[in-house]
Image (cartoon, grey):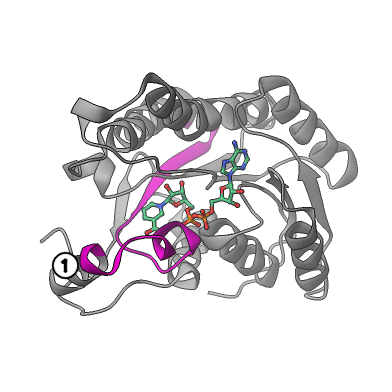
Amino acid sequence: MGDKLSRVALVSGGSRGIGRAAVLRLAQDGHDVAFCYRSDADAAQALEKEASELGVRVLAVRADVTDAQAVRGLAERTEDELGPIDVVVTSAGITSDNPLLLMTDEQWHNVLDINLDGVYHVCRAAIFAMMKRKSGCVINVSSVAGVYGNARQTNYSASKAGIIGFTKALAKEAGPYGIRANVVAPGFIDTDMTSTLQGGVKDRALKSIPLGRMGRADEVADLIAYLASDRAAYITGSVFQIDGGITI
Ligand code: NAD
């Protein structure tokens, strides 16, 4: 890894966790990178500075992925200021856990709106220009919960399984236009998302990971960068688990 590319990447949910690591990793590989964030302008600014010190152009845009118009604006600004989008990475996502019996409609819709509609909005905003140019690459971040299901996460698991179906359909539809679409499905990764888990839940999860530890955001970003590169030129419609073996 490490070939300099001079391509443009767009990352959703870039200011934190896996999205943030992807911004830095893609910048290291020579991509100019635009990323959106929902609320933390300070974190976004700090990342913009850190990534641009790697010698690429970086653009941070406040945009909520549930807002189709804001996402279209994000894609337009990216193309205007950085150039045609070559790589799309969707990392924006949330959890809001409850057993189905206690799940509120708000929890259900909030998770589906951000995790699944958000992916639709970002891909929809970028796809036309990619199809016109007959090249591009989409990497959607799902979860092992979308492959195997997690108790207390019917909403999250449904949204992440939806991303897998969406991406496979997109791979078939856009493949003839030279566009690849793949899914990265992380297991238990050490980010703010998992930092709120109670000790007992964390301990139980750790015991079921053959590699005996949580994954790191930069390890997921390495996989994303590989899929974005020409070394993955014949890979499309695939789901890549990165989970330390938790699902074996
Ligand atoms: P995180 O909470 O650290 O980061 C999530 C990012 O998404 C944040 O930057 C947040 O601002 C952004 N975001 C949330 N809602 C948004 C919205 N409406 N509009 C724009 N941005 C929004 O979490 P993370 O662990 O980095 O998760 C990144 C992705 O990886 C998520 O899709 C998550 O479901 C997935 N994932 C994480 C793990 C894990 O263990 N951490 C495991 C599997 C999958």
| Position of 21 relative to 176 (above/below) | below
Q: Decide if residue 42 is on the left or right side of residue 237.
A: right
The percent coordinates of residue 23 (x first, y second) are: 65, 61
Q: Decide if residue 202 is on the left or right side of residue 33.
A: left
What is the quadrant of the C terminus in the image? bottom left
Residue type at mark 1?
Arg
Give the residue displayed 54% in from the left and 62% down from the top: 17
Label 1 CA crowd tier, 10 Å (few <14, some 14–19, many 20+): few
Q: Is residue 194 magenta?
A: yes
Q: Is residue 2 magenta?
A: no
Q: In the depicted view, which residue is nearer to us: 195 or 187? A: 195
Give the residue displayed 80% in from the left and 41% down from the top: 78
Ligand 1 within 8 angstroms of badge 1 C-beta: no
Q: In the depicted view, which residue is nearer to us: 98 or 181? A: 98
Which residue lies most toward the front here? 102
Q: Where is mark 1, residue-wise?
A: 204
Specify the segment rendered in magenta.
Answer: 175-201
The quarter of the displayed image where residue 197 is located: bottom left
Q: In the depicted view, which residue is nearer to us: 237 or 39? A: 39
Give the residue displayed 32% in from the left and 31% down from the top: 155
Circle count: 1
The quarter of the displayed image where residue 212 is located: bottom left
Give the residue displayed 67% in from the left and 34% down from the top: 64
